[in-house]
Amino acid sequence: MEKDKELVAQLKRVLAAVEQILPRAVEPIDWSQTLAASWRCHSVAGYLEAMPAGEANRLDDLLGIDEQKRIVADNTAQFVAGLPANNALLWGSRGTGKSSLVRALLHHFAPAGLRVIQIDKDDLHHLPDIFSQIKDLPYRFVLFCDDLSFEAGEKSYKILKSALDGAVYSAPVNCLIYVTSNRRYLLPQYETDHLGNLMKGNEIRASDAIEEKSSLADRFGLWVSFDSFSQEQYLRVVRQCVDQLCAAQRASLPWDVAAEQAAIAWSHEKSKRCGRTAYQFAKRWVGSQLRQRGEAAAAQ
């Protein structure tokens, strides 16, 4: 009897330990009601978890990146229509709207069957598991990896290369891969990488190191660059942001030299002229101006 109790206690301890390793039980995602999910890793396994809808970004709300929007939206429209389309690398300066564009595309094309799955860099080795879960579903999926870059010595980029290159772990036909990054080639490049460059027929041939580091980016059929704004472009976007915020508040504010100088000073403080900086200034300026207007009206 005493041995039975001891055995039961041991089994309980074993089950408790196993529960810490196994992922929690989750209901299958109802993609008819869910627009986006993220891959959650738990020990050696993982699962897809539905993400809340959040604020719906519209393509028209993204200012100053009209050409980038056109290129990526056209590619996504082809994909949703079942036509040939490319995996996309959106690269460039921080705050220029790369991630916001992907979110806006989701809400724009969701009625046509587009869905998004977000995955972190550290979980890329789970790509085959994700592909097996979505390959037979009647939706078009964008697998989205945000702010991706690899450091020297990291090998997980090879999994992504295989998924992009049509190898054993390639994405199913109903899935594209969209990546955003501040790095054009996703991998760091060093001056020493160029020491192996060769001259062949008066043409410079890249070293093996450069070829290897460029090979990942080369597998994306679509490269879309996002650059910092000129001051003129920045101020134009600021004014558009101000107009949008004022319209939402059913108010109007004059735009004068003082407001323009404040916007320029804000960009200097942030050391960046981009859509994010413009929107942040617009929120600060519109909010403060309307608050002061309200306080003045209350004092009368």
Image (spheres, rainbow, N blue to C red):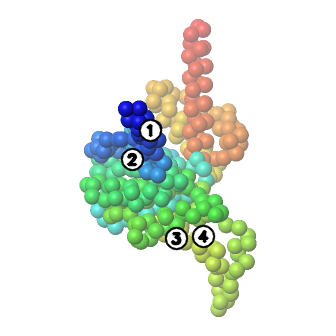
Alpha carbons under labels 1 and 3: distance apart: 54 Å
Residue assigned mark 3: 218
Tell me if residue 98 comes above or below residue 218 in the rendering.
above
42 or 289, which lies in front? 42
Residue assigned mark 1: 10
Marked residue nearer the N-terminal end (4 or 2): 2
Q: Residue 204 at x, y = what percent?
A: 66, 83
Q: Residue 57 at x, y = what percent?
A: 43, 42
Do residues under tags 4 and 2 come within 8 Å of each other at their CB atoms? no
Marked residue nearer the N-terminal end (1 or 2): 1
Residue assigned mark 2: 48
Marked residue nearer the N-terminal end (2 or 3): 2
Q: Residue at x 65, y 38 (%)?
A: 263
Q: Which mark is residue 213?
A: 4
Q: SS of the residue at dot 2? A: strand
Do residues under tags 2 and 3 come within 8 Å of each other at their CB atoms? no
150 or 269, which lies in front? 150
Q: Which mark is residue 135?
A: none
Marked residue nearer the N-terminal end (1 or 4): 1
Q: SS of the residue at dot 1? A: helix
Asked if one can make out residue 254 in the rendered structure from this viewpoint, the answer is no
Q: Residues within 10 Å of mark 1 (few under 14, many from 20)?
A: few
Marked residue nearer the N-terminal end (1 or 3): 1
Alpha carbons under labels 3 and 4: distance apart: 9 Å
Left/right placement of residue 198 relative to residue 244 reads right
Alpha carbons under labels 2 and 3: distance apart: 29 Å
Closer to the observer: label 4 or label 2?
Answer: 2
Alpha carbons under labels 1 and 2: distance apart: 33 Å
Asked if one can make out residue 48 in the rendered structure from this viewpoint, the answer is yes
